[in-house]
Image (cartoon, coloured by chain):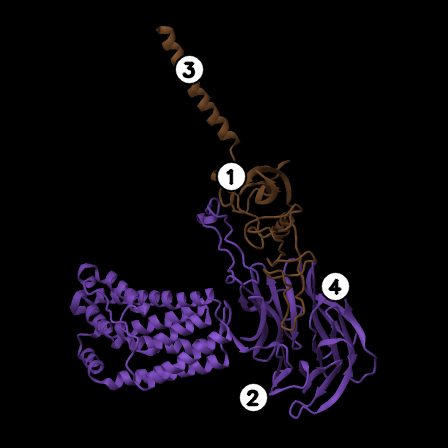
Chain colours: A purple, B brown
């Protein structure tokens, strides 16, 4: 959602730029009757102008995203600053205020005389797409720059840049070929003589910026993804649980929270919240309490000495003791608690997830990791996924689809698939936890001998210096998946919950 | 006069031969840092074995180390302590949001891991030592019967035995000064 709003804001900001001295000049420059001399040259120049504008936009906003990443942006503080700037810019646009700070520069006029027009148009496009090299007609440009830095996502920055470049190019390539027609003259005159059009565009800029600010406030930052967009849904927060209608999570160092279907959020009187079977649960010391989600009135409770995270369904309640044992008990207490799985440290068992009588959890250690399932009713158990050199972590299960984290030296993925599937779909991919080196020693260069086409294969992306992100616990809703992102930075661990659309 | 001239020429030519000989010998024994490709001491173009953190530095048992400081890393590239627990740069254990330690991961010797990844057996055969960064470095070839090396083109014999060829390369930095 935030991505689309930013694209809309960038597109509107780019279009607004057509009212600048350079924007008007471009229409005249590319017109067939001008330097082009004929329509074919105009069309070629329009194409190169568009490419230049797109490249310029990507360079500026993608570069700002890179800068943000290098600065360790992406947290709630930076996002809050970005939201505030977006609000201020929206107010400025709504009131039609004079743009400050202004860039009082224009593209070089001589290029269109001394260079072939398509080349000049391409270079003009680059300068206009860059955004900050010529007059600025809307506060949205400044706001989008701040947002790009604050979110710290080069891919999203590049998307903003593409939209901005497209917005800058659109009026020019729409008007230039028809500049000498009656209709072209009329449009040009309207642009020049009717300030209401520009005011309307600035009002549109204000609306899109306000929507962006709102979205950033709800979802403060955007995370990198090559498959689908992921946004921070909750912060600080960890260990999500959902049954589709309700979402529960743990606030680090505090108690759990519950967001009901109607959007209200309440603090729970215990930790490690869980949802299922129409109820909400929390851990109160060594007791697991299940309660009505509307009133939080306890309905039942189970003694679970040493329990940590837990899960429950209509038939079972399961909990983890330390990081080495998972116990289960029928909800009707027809059996005493029994161990489903036990390991010896340093091996670890993960947080349990439950759908009906089917339990899933991870087992990870120095010999590799695996995701296991246990049919608590039948007493059977089998391995669903196994890898030796990658970690498979924290599965969630909704009865038909398995969601889990796969972490390797080259990246971290949130994957989804049927339990028995041979391959899974990647919902979200981000950087590996560890930062790799350049694969070269100082004073040495890369060689390309022997590689197909003489080009080395690309290396995996690497996180910023001093930042170690770990994708962690998951939850699977009907329309979205959730994953905790742990971030180690400056000796401290913070946690947020990312929301990733399932489609 | 003639004898003294001959003597002088003999001394000069002898000196020149001595300098040339010394340079020839020097070129044979000098450490090969300047000849190296992407890391010191590696004088051929076969590329590094896949390593969790990039440069293919390993410990004496072939397990991955972070090249810049020799700290042990797991297969995910995370720094780990002696118990295999992932740690940060300050040596503190990585934890979840509630302070519980994150699970350890495998830490596999690099050359066998390459074999698993590419689907054929691999092993370390011979090696060579060079002086790098003030310490002796052991350069090792990860060998296989594959005719292709990791770059994708033909593999070389390198330090491999018995018909095996170099698939990729790794190194071990000793503590021996040079």
Q: Are marks 3 and 4 on the same chain?
A: no
Residue A345, numbered label: 4
Q: Decide: is B148 above or below A150.
A: above
Point out the frontmost of discs 1 and 4: 4
| Residue B27, percent from left and from top | 49, 30
Secondary structure at badge 1 equals loop
Secondary structure at badge 3 equals helix
Comparing B28 with A179, the one in front is B28
Q: Which residue is mark 3?
A: B11
Earlier along the polypeptide chain: callout 4 or callout 2?
Answer: 2
Secondary structure at badge 4 equals loop
Gap in angstroms between the C-alphas marked 4 and 2: 41 Å
Comparing A134 with A208, the one in front is A134
Residue shown at 80%/72% (left/top)?
A339
Residue A263, numbered label: 2
- The chain letter for the residue carrying disc 1 is B
In the image, farthest residue toward the right: A335
Q: Decide: is B100 above or below A80.
A: above
Residue B43, numbered label: 1
Among the 4 quarters of the image, the one containing residue A266? bottom right
Residue shown at 37%/72% (left/top)?
A163
- The chain letter for the residue carrying disc 2 is A
Q: Seen in the image, is A132 located left or right of residue A1?
A: left
- The 10 Å Cα crowd at callout 2, few under 14, some 14 to 19, many 20 or more, is few
Gap in angstroms between the C-alphas marked 3 and 4: 77 Å
Point out the frontmost of discs 3 and 1: 3
Comparing A189 with A407, the one in front is A407
């Amino acid at each position: 959602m935030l991505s689309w709003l930013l694209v809309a804001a960038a597109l509107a900001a780019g279009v607004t730029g057509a009212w600048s001295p350079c924007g008007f000049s471009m229409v005249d420059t590319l017109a067939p009757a001008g330097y082009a001399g004929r329509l074919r040259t105009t069309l070629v120049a329009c194409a190169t102008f568009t490419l230049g504008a797109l490249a310029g936009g990507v360079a500026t906003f993608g570069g700002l995203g890179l800068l943000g990443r290098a600065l360790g942006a992406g947290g709630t503080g930076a996002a809050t600053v970005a939201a505030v700037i977006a609000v201020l810019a929206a107010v400025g646009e709504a009131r039609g205020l004079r743009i400050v700070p202004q860039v009082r520069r224009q593209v070089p006029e001589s290029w269109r005389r001394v260079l072939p027009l398509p080349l000049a148009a391409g270079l003009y496009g680059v300068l206009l797409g860059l955004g900050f090299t010529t007059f600025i007609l809307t506060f949205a440009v400044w706001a989008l720059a701040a947002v790009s830095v604050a979110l710290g996502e080069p891919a999203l920055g590049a998307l903003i840049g593409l939209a901005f470049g497209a917005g800058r190019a659109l009026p020019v390539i729409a008007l230039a070929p028809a500049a000498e027609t009656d209709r072209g003259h009329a449009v040009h005159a309207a642009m020049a003589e009717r300030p209401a059009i520009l005011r309307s565009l600035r009002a549109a800029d204000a609306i899109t910026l306000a929507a962006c600010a709102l979205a950033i406030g709800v979802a403060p930052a955007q995370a990198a993804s090559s498959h689908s967009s992921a946004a921070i849904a909750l912060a600080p927060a960890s260990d999500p649980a959902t049954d589709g209608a309700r979402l529960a999570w743990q606030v680090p160092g505090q108690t759990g929270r519950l967001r009901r279907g109607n959007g209200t959020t309440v603090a729970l009187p215990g930790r490690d919240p869980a949802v299922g079977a129409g109820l909400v649960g929390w851990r109160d010391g060594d007791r697991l309490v299940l309660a009505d989600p509307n009133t939080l009135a306890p309905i039942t409770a189970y003694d679970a000495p040493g329990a940590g995270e837990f899960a429950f369904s209509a038939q079972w309640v399961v909990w983890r003791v330390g990081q080495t044992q998972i116990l289960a008990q029928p909800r009707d207490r027809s059996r005493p608690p029994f161990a489903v799985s036990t390991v010896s440290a340093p091996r670890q068992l993960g947080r349990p997830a439950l759908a009906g009588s089917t339990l899933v959890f991870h087992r990870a250690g120095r010999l590799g990791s695996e995701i296991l399932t246990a049919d608590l009713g039948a007493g059977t158990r089998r391995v669903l996924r196994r890898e030796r050199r990658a970690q498979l972590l924290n599965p969630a299960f909704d009865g038909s689809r398995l969601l889990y984290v796969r972490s390797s030296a080259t990246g971290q993925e949130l994957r989804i698939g049927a339990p028995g599937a041979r391959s899974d779909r990647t919902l979200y991919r981000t950087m590996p936890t560890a930062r790799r080196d350049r694969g070269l020693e100082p004073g040495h260069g890369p060689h390309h001998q022997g590689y197909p086409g003489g080009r080395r294969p690309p290396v995996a992306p690497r996180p910023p210096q001093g930042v170690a992100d770990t994708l962690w616990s998951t939850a699977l809703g009907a329309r979205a998946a959730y994953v905790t992102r742990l971030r180690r930075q400056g000796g401290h661990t913070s946690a947020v919950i990312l929301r990733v659309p399932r489609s | 006069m003639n004898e003294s001239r001959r003597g002088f020429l003999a001394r000069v030519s002898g000196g020149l031969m001595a300098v040339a000989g010394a340079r020839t010998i020097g070129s044979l024994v000098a450490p090969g840092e300047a000849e190296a490709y992407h890391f010191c001491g590696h004088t051929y173009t076969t590329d590094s074995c896949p390593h969790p953190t990039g440069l293919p530095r390993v410990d004496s048992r072939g397990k991955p180390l972070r090249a810049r400081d020799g700290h042990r890393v797991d297969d995910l590239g995370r720094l780990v302590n002696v118990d295999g627990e992932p740690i940060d740069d300050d040596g503190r254990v990585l934890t979840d949001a509630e302070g519980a330690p994150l699970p350890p991961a495998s830490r596999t010797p690099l050359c066998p891991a390459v074999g698993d990844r590419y689907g054929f057996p691999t092993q370390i055969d011979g090696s060579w030592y060079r002086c790098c960064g003030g310490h002796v470095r052991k350069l090792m070839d990860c060998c296989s019967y594959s005719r292709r090396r990791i770059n994708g083109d033909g593999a070389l014999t390198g330090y491999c035995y018995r018909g095996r060829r170099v698939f990729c390369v790794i190194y071990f930095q000793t503590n021996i000064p040079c």
